[in-house]
Image (tube, rainbow, N blue to C red):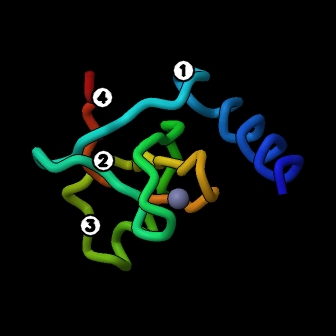
Amino acid sequence: MKKFLGAFAAGVKAMADGPTPDRFEVAGRPVRCPHCGGEHFLEGRAQLNTAGLTFLNLDWANRSAATLACVGCGRLEWFLADPEERA
Ligand SMILES: [Zn+2]
């Protein structure tokens, strides 16, 4: 399991702005992993294609989404809003 998470974190790290896990908040609320309750995530970005956005009626949104990968269990959270780093 540790090996898997290490490989996963390395993969996420490659697309993240910063390599170290941080705590985040979105819409004024702390982001907490719904699976393991962890509060430390690696931030990344994922491109959303235009066809997908149109299908989802999300043309108003940015064409990329923020991804937060839980370092505790590997769960991936997606946000269209930019998560804020918490001190
Ligand atoms: Zn988790």
**Please, what secondary structure does the residue beneath circle 2 have?**
loop
Q: Which residue is mark 2?
A: 62
Residue 22 on image: x %, y %? 43, 30
Dot 1 or dot 3, earlier in sequence:
1
Please name the residue shown 30% across and 53% down the image. Answer: 80
Kindly report the distance in space between the C-alpha atoms of the residues bearing marks 1 and 3. 28 Å
Q: Which residue is mark 1?
A: 18
Q: Which residue is mark 4?
A: 85
Dot 2 or dot 4, earlier in sequence:
2
Between label 2 and label 1, give the one nearer the viewer.
1
Indicate the amino acid at tag 1.
Gly
Q: Is residue 68 above or below residue 59?
A: above
Please name the residue shown 59% across and 51% down the image. Answer: 72
**Please, what secondary structure does the residue beneath circle 4 have?**
strand
Q: Quadrant of residue 86?
A: top left
Total numbered labels placed on residues in the image: 4
Residue 59 on image: x %, y %? 25, 62
Kindly report the distance in space between the C-alpha atoms of the residues bearing marks 4 and 3. 25 Å
Between label 1 and label 3, give the one nearer the viewer.
1
Q: Is residue 52 above or below residue 18?
A: below
Kindly report the distance in space between the C-alpha atoms of the residues bearing marks 2 and 3. 9 Å
Q: Which residue is mark 3?
A: 58
